[in-house]
Amino acid sequence: MKLTPPLGIFGGTFDPIHNGHIFPVIEAAEKTNITKIALMPCYIPSHKDPATASSEDRLKMVKLICGQYPLFYADSRDINRGKPTFSVDSLTEIRQSMPTTPLCFFIGTDSLQNLFTWHNWEKLFSLCHFVVCSRDGETLNAINTYSDALQTLLKKRQVTDPIALHNSLAGYIYLANTQTLTVSSTEIRKQIFNNQSVEKLLPSKILDYIQRHKLYQPHTDFC
Ligand code: ATP
């Protein structure tokens, strides 16, 4: 079967999207020669937390990033479903519509470490590869600190040459060993709530959007 170039998929809550999402993924895309990545915000029930942005706001922020970086486009399928779903559901859907495209799911090392808790995680390896961005200072040396089960999985699935991601549809893990940026959406929400500066943690377009729409502010109107 002749394969088309791989598609990257990067899912997250993106509440809000920040530099730690954007720059490690751009770097990993350069290392793997992946030229298109779908940013896929997940759906969160609107009643979850008053300080959490709506699906609509999170998608709009993702779209602002897509306008700025041609590498990315927004995939709103999870949000459009309007109910919480699993990565395996979205990947199954994408695989059905793209039977000859290698799919590369981008995640951070924290997500890699909890992969075994993901719904139907084993099936994911028949649907996609994983490209892993470093998080919180974790270099490749951190592998020794991973659980035995994860080290065994890596022995079976890890590739060090990203060409493998282009030559088969699914099944490999590539540790991209990207520069780490210590930032999380939780920390950003907390800092905005406490009136602290977050301008170094996210693009100015996103900060601007947050300020214009008064997101993540202390809530006074509980009902
Ligand atoms: P929260 O703090 O709300 O849990 P988050 O900042 O961890 O959010 P998510 O939207 O939950 O962000 O994460 C989506 C994906 O991005 C996950 O695979 C996560 O590992 C990765 N990621 C998030 N922040 C970073 C970062 N600073 N460096 C590398 N990967 C990251």
Image (cartoon, rainbow, N blue to C red):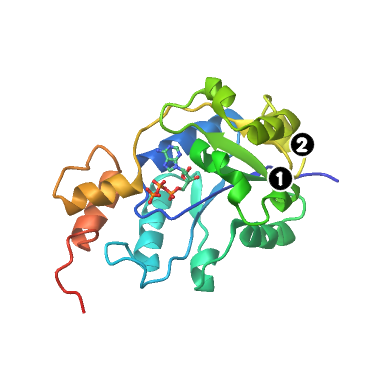
Give the amino acid type for the residue marked by disc 1 in the picture.
Pro
| Residue 79, numbered label | none
Q: Residue furthest bottom?
A: 223
User: Label 2 belongs to which residue?
Assistant: 167
Residue 26 horizontal/vertical position (percent): 48, 36
Mark 2 nearby-residue class (10 Å; few <14, some 14–19, many ≥20): some
The yes-or-no answer for disc 2 within 8 Å of ligand 1 is no
Q: CA distance from mark 2 to mark 1?
A: 8 Å
- Image position of 197 with respect to 77: above or below: above
The yes-or-no answer for disc 1 within 8 Å of ligand 1 is no
Residue 174 horizontal/vertical position (percent): 63, 32
Q: Residue furthest front?
A: 148
Q: Are marks 2 and 1 in contact (CB under 8 Å)?
A: yes
Label 1 SS: loop
- Image position of 145 with respect to 37: above or below: above
Give the amino acid type for the residue marked by disc 2 in the picture.
Asn
For residue 215, side relative to residue 135 (left or right): left
Q: Quadrant of residue 56?
A: bottom left
- Image position of 83 with respect to 18: above or below: below
Residue 186 horizontal/vertical position (percent): 32, 49
Of label 2 and label 1, which has the lower sequence position? 1
**Residue at position x 53%, y 24% from top?**
142
Q: Residue furthest top?
A: 141
- Looking at the rendered image, the quarter that the C terminus falls into is bottom left
**Residue at position x 42%, y 26% from top?**
137
**Residue at position x 41%, y 61% from top?**
59
| Residue 102, numbered label | 1
Q: In what quadrant does ligand 1 lie? A: top left
